Amino acid sequence: MNLTELCPMAEIDDNDAKGMVAVVEGKQRNILVARKGEQAFAYLNWCPHNQVLIDQIPGKFFDAEHQYLQCSKHGAKFRVEDGRCIEGPCEGGGLKQLSLELKDGVVFLAES
């Protein structure tokens, strides 16, 4: 298992997300790491509907209530826990989830 350090968990507010660049499957990619309580979830920062970054408004990954990840281009909403689109033009689709590990308060991308 190959671990790449992304950021300290403390840098991500609860019910918020942080965008960054990381090497995924050998390529530099835009990703996002979302936090819900003491859990973190990572996805490619790429809307399956329109092939654009989720945060067309830089750093804005959530809806107004901070309940769902939301593409700021067309409003598609995604569950934080699994990336599934529950509303909008890509309903039924989803974000590409990435594996994470948390160690001593630090978030790592985990690839085999």
Image (tube, helix red, strand yellow):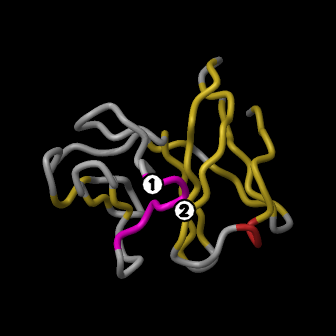
Q: Nearer the viewer, residue 61 or 90?
A: 61
Report the residue marked by disc 2. Answer: 34
- Residue 35 magenta: no
91 shown above or below 28: below
Q: Earlier in the sequence, mark 2 or mark 1?
A: 2
Determine the residue positioned at 42% across, 48% down.
Answer: 56
- Mark number for residue 57? 1
State the separation of the CA atoms marked 2 and 1: 16 Å
Per the rendered image, the range of residues in magenta is: 57-63
Residue at horizontal 47%, vertical 42%?
A: 45
Residue 72: percent from left, percent from top: 33, 55
Counting from the top left corner in percent of width and height, residue 103 is at 81, 60
Q: Neighbour class for label 1 at 10 Å: few (<14), some, many (≥20)?
A: few
Figure check: 38 above or below 77: below
Disc 2 residue type (three-letter): Ala
User: Is 108 drawn above or below residue 52 in the view shown?
Assistant: below
Mark 2: secondary structure: strand
Badge 2 crowding class, 10 Å Cα cut-off, few under 14, some 14 to 19, many 20 or more, is: many
